[in-house]
Amino acid sequence: MSTDLTKPKQDLVIPNYLKVEGDTSLDVVKQYVRPPRIKVIQSLSDQKLRDAFGVGATILVPDNTLLMDVVRDEKGNVQPAMSQPFTFTPIFFFVEFCLWNPLEMKGELSAIRERSFDQKSRLAIRARDFANRTQPCPENVAYECSFCEHLNFIVDVHGQKEPCILTFSRGEFKTGTTFLTLLKVRSVPIYGNIFEAHLAHRHGTKGDWFGLDPSNPSGGESPFVGEEAFQKYRKLHEKCVTDHAEELIKVNYEDDPIDVDSVSTAASTM
């Protein structure tokens, strides 16, 4: 298996004899919906990703497809304003509540201890209680588990082959709520919109990091999809509604269990 993370995934040429009409062998497999996730590389992200793409680059995981390359000045500092944004259409929105195990217990415990879509669950109540978002880790009380609310959008990044997940939580939660407000102002079905995602440098009380700012298209481009695309996205939205109701949509957050609101990522110098 190739270890070159920058090499794009090759299209498979399927022999004709494998194209079986009416085949049902993948029906159960297709029930498990695990969309790729949009990830901005931070200085505490996996070393292989930092070496391959650089801090500040935006990729799709787990296939490591580059979405937005990072631009640096002559001193090597990241210049977010110079990065080329990508356009996308949101198809479906849902919220998930998670209880995260401590980062210090990585390798001993899974990243996520519990997860739920239920807005009335204990996880939801604790995740939305700013003063009560942690609890001692049962396996090591010296560390704390944290409750987290994830704002998840299934989006179609224009030019990509399949929908993916754009998620906002922790230090990016406010950006997610701002995006929700922008959607409300548009006053059209969620899947009728076009947005741009711009790289942004965040400044927090305990550190800096990179995030993505959704905005209206620049250059006078239309903020709405065409009629043919609208009908396609409506069907995708309806399928997402069904999949979510049956709890088939699973988001893999576990490759990046970093609380960007509480750790320094040395973003401006990497």
Image (cartoon, grey):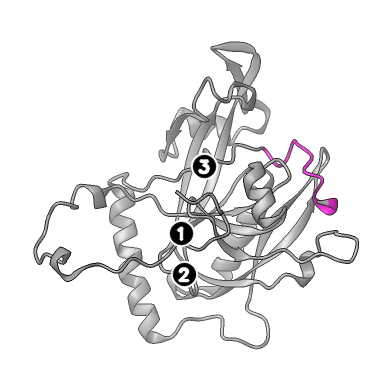
Residue linked to disc 2: 160
Label 1 with label 2: CB-CB less than 8 Å: yes
Residue linked to disc 1: 164
- In this view, the residue in front, 30 or 195, is 30
Residue 101 found in image quarter: top right
- Work out whether 213 lies above or below 99: below
Instruction: Residue at 34%, 71% (x, y): give it.
Output: 234
* Residue 145 placement (x, y as % from top left): 59, 23
Task: Look at the image and give the residue range highlighted in magenta.
Answer: 259-269
Which secondary structure, mark 1?
strand
Residue linked to disc 3: 253
Which of the labelled discs sits on residue 92, or is there none?
none
The residue at the far left in this view is 22
The residue at the far bottom in this view is 220
> In whole angstroms, how far apart are the C-alphas of marks 3 and 2?
21 Å
Label 3 with label 2: CB-CB less than 8 Å: no
Q: Main secondary structure of the magenta part?
A: loop
Residue 100 found in image quarter: top right
Which secondary structure, mark 3?
loop
* Residue 202 placement (x, y as % from top left): 78, 52
Residue flagged by tag 2: what amino acid is it? Gln
